Amino acid sequence: MTAGSRPPASLPADRLEQQFVDAKPALTDSEALIEANRCLFCHDAPCITACPTGIDIPAFIKKIATGNIRGSAKTIFSVNMTGATTARVCPVEELCVGACVYIHLNAKPIQIGKLQRYATSKALEREARGGPPLFTPLPDTGKKVALIGAGPASLACAAHLALAGVTPVIYEKSEHPGGLNTTGIAPYKLKAEDSLREVEWILSHGVTLKTGVELGRDIEFAQLLDECDALFLGLGLGGDTRLDIPGSDGPGVWGATELIRAIKNSGGFTIPDDVSSALVVGAGNTAIDIARELAMLGLPDVDLVYRRTEEEMSGYAHELEGARSYGVRLIEQVQPLEVIRNGDRVEALKVLDLINNEEVELPCDWVVEAIGQRKFSFSLPDGVNRDDKGRIEVDEATRRTGHPDVYAGGDCINGGKEVVHAAADGREAAFAMLRGWDLPRGNS
Amino acid sequence: MADLSVNMAGIESPNPFWLASGPPSNSGEQVMRAFDAGWGGAVWKTLGEPIVNVSSRLGAIDYGGVAMAGLNNIELITDRPLEVNLKEIYEVKKKYPGHAVIASLMVETKEDWRDIIKRCEDSGADGLELNFGCPHGMCERGMGSAVGQEPKVLTEITSWAKEFATIPVLIKLTPNVGDILDPGLAAVAGGADGLALINTIKSIIGVNLDDLTLRPTVGAESTNGGYCGPAVKPIALHMVGALARDERVNIPISGIGGISDWRDAAEFIALGSTTVQVCTAVMHYGFRVVEDMLDGLSNYLDEQGMPSVNDLIGKAVPGFKEWGELDLNYNVVAKINADTCIGCQLCYVACLDGAHQCIHTHQGPCVAFHGESDHGMNPRIEVLAPVNHDPNGNALFVPSVDEVECIGCNLCALVCPVPGCVTMVPVDNGKGRESWNDRMAKGEA
Ligand SMILES: Cc1cc2nc3c(=O)[nH]c(=O)nc-3n(C[C@H](O)[C@H](O)[C@H](O)COP(=O)(O)OP(=O)(O)OC[C@H]3O[C@@H](n4cnc5c(N)ncnc54)[C@H](O)[C@@H]3O)c2cc1C
Ligand SMILES: Cc1cc2nc3c(=O)[nH]c(=O)nc-3n(C[C@H](O)[C@H](O)[C@H](O)COP(=O)(O)O)c2cc1C
Ligand code: SF4
């Protein structure tokens, strides 16, 4: 076993995330059939173009309509091996669903994400119950690839490599695989156990996972480059960026992803009874997510505080809409100055009202900082460069870095997009490696 | 992954899916794209003496928001020169030697048949399909369905073709006959190597109510055309089954008519088809529909534990019986699942007005219509289901079936919009099997 490596831990039983119900519930058989039959089966469909992994959406929906669930799931997974989770976490309103031609008819667009969830979860259930596997990997080619980080980018890359008969070994620093799919996605979209179920399925194709191994601490680039034919970096981003204002260092002030992770993964974590209001600093999707999560957990008073205006926020309008339906408000054009506390208790957030140019104290019990994630800090091998925003630079078509054997994908190259972009990067990197070795793709 | 390859009357095909003779198989360029998409074979658009087509040519019926549930056409055979078609057949066969290319033919005299068959064989076609089916235009000139409706003529032309041809000869039948066995047996008598059916059904697709012209209009007029597409599938299935179960029909069948997906294809194969042909579904969605046909059929065969599509051919034929052979003592009754019922009452009104008045709501059958329970149709208290409530507290009247009265017709299960909500459950009435024929034999009828 590699230094530091430990087997993946199982999830604790009493996680706060278990209290959440799906915001978009699964379709029943009859709902799926009715919805699938509504699809017009467009040629050269705009939804396909809008999908970063280019899933043949009309084809997989048609297969649901003909009862060919296995074929439907294969159509999805053959281009997106994290298709079971992206079905649930993708901002479909901004991607495939937003491109559906029904919108031009002023009719309800096809619920593509829900149909994708239907086909993939049905097929994976059948396979788990002993049905014929969707994919059979090609025979061993003798090639070996090391992947850093077990998030969607590495998982997608490893899966496509494994199907082609390449041996992938994933090194993950935390105790659970899945990256932000396991630790960060809002639990009303996806719970950690669903993320782990997909990871398990991917691993079943011959992917080795070593958890508790951190690159830069337990293992070094030079060693990996020595042992393997190629290296894939799916590092994601670092921890929360912090405000660093007076009073922010202490109990009651959280980093957003730190708090989300506690809700999703920590056993026995609860919100104390004397906490009834929270201010979330920021207006990106992470800020909106945690605000909605706290409101759904029963906090009566949750507000977003944001330096600029609603029009300028980076979070999606449909996400803010969703949070507002749980009572979350957006306070615009205020700049946090100081966390006012009484010992260990937070009493208020002092902000500068940028319109009236005056200082105001907004009472609250918790402050959650959702202003971004840091970039990782260790040094990269020669040839692997970062741009001025800290993103690893890659060739657009192959996801290859300046080092001929090192590829990268996901949040660490795009600065933080979506799971589906990470999946597309992982696949393209795998395909580029296979092309380089003159090996066929395996996806039957 | 099941083996999909088949041999139809000596014609090898990588899979049972063929383009039917029609617009999708009009040119070599189309057929090659179809083969690239996955089609195993193609029956070329019918070749013959040069003709002139009209414009417009197609009409359709939309049903339940779905376009082209049924399609009607007044197109004739190919309007491209014979030499061009033959050259393209030659090119396709050269490029796709493993795929099946069948030349569809329709000419008049014995000499014409001799000549065109020779030229098709020279072009490399794997087989011939004699088009005795077209029910419009060509039949007015004594060809197409005019031949298919005259068993004697059909036998004679078939035997000419068998005399001239060295490659397999399939006979394409018209459904516009009283009994499909007549032309089917006539083809067998002429020595045919296989049958293909159905061609289109004589039809008028509709009348424009604005100007009272028929569709599809040619100026202010129109003519009867041929009907095909999903709507004709049950008619085609019956005709295929009727031939497949007759032991005198000892040649393979290519099933055609309304095949839109792998399920339709599997049904045709189970009823005795070795290959299936598709026209309308391709005209609607393109060659790409074959991808799910191949994938879905293969997955289905895997799930059925059938290693080859040949294992499915004819598997449903033994169950196709005469009415007189059916068991008169077999009984089913409807059961309504109260947990999935959405309270639409469609089964109730269907049984009340369109069947046997044995589904009841809590109010009694007639209250809904004139406020009184009368006509002696009050439901017996013991058959009433309890009233359920939806999450908002509204009463949800789950209808209940009076199983003593239910005659097991299936209507309620057919009209129910919720899959699996109404099921038909066999009841054991303690009586053994007895058919009408059995009763006749005992002199009891
Ligand atoms: C709060 C939040 C909510 C989100 N919600 C959505 C959403 O609803 N829908 C959506 O599509 N996207 C969402 N995203 C974005 C999405 O989660 C990411 O784009 C995606 O997970 C990126 O995948 P990745 O594989 O690049 O990185 P990650 O998922 O971050 O995975 C990186 C992995 O690498 C490991 N790692 C890092 N450094 C090392 C090292 N040195 N050694 C070993 N292992 C290491 C990490 O522990 C981690 O497991 C959200 C993000 C956040 C923060
Ligand atoms: C526009 C059109 C043209 C056709 N032309 C021919 C033809 O030239 N020769 C022939 O044998 N059948 C012809 N057919 C009939 C088809 O081959 C087929 O038998 C029929 O359409 C039923 O199949 P489907 O329901 O899949 O369309 C034609 C059908 C259509 C719609
Ligand atoms: S489909 Fe339309 S464009 Fe094409 S030939 Fe027919 S009428 Fe003309």
Image (tube, coloured by chain):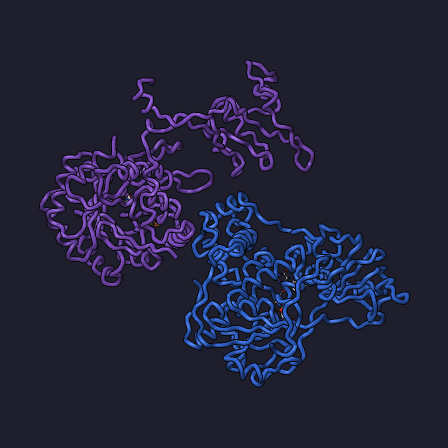
| Whether residue B403 is situated above or below residue B311 in the rendered picture | above
Q: Is residue A396 visible?
A: no
Residue A154, located in which quarter of the rendered image?
bottom right
**The C terminus of chain A is located in which quarter?**
bottom left
Q: Colour of chain A?
A: blue
Residue A1 in percent (x, y) is at 60, 77
Work out whether B10 lies above or below B392.
below
**Observer able to see residue B94:** yes
Q: Is residue A294 left or right of residue B34?
A: right
Residue extending farthest to the left is B111
Question: Quick check: A428 left or right of B123?
Answer: right
How many callouts does the rendering have?
A: 0
Residue under the point 45% across and 54% down: A59
Nearest to the observer: residue A5 or residue A118 = A5
Q: Position of residue B112 (x, y in %)?
A: 11, 46
Q: Nearer the viewer, residue A54 or A357?
A: A54
Front one among B389 and A278:
B389
Q: Residue furthest right?
A: A342
Chain that is coloured purple in the picture:
B
From this view, report whether residue A121 is shown above or below residue A202.
Answer: above
B415 relative to B199 in the view: left or right: right
Measured from the top left, where is residue B38 in percent x and y?
Answer: 34, 57
| Ligand 1 found in image quarter | bottom right
Q: Nearer the viewer, residue B208 or A366?
A: A366
At 21% from the left and 52% from the top, the residue drawn is B10
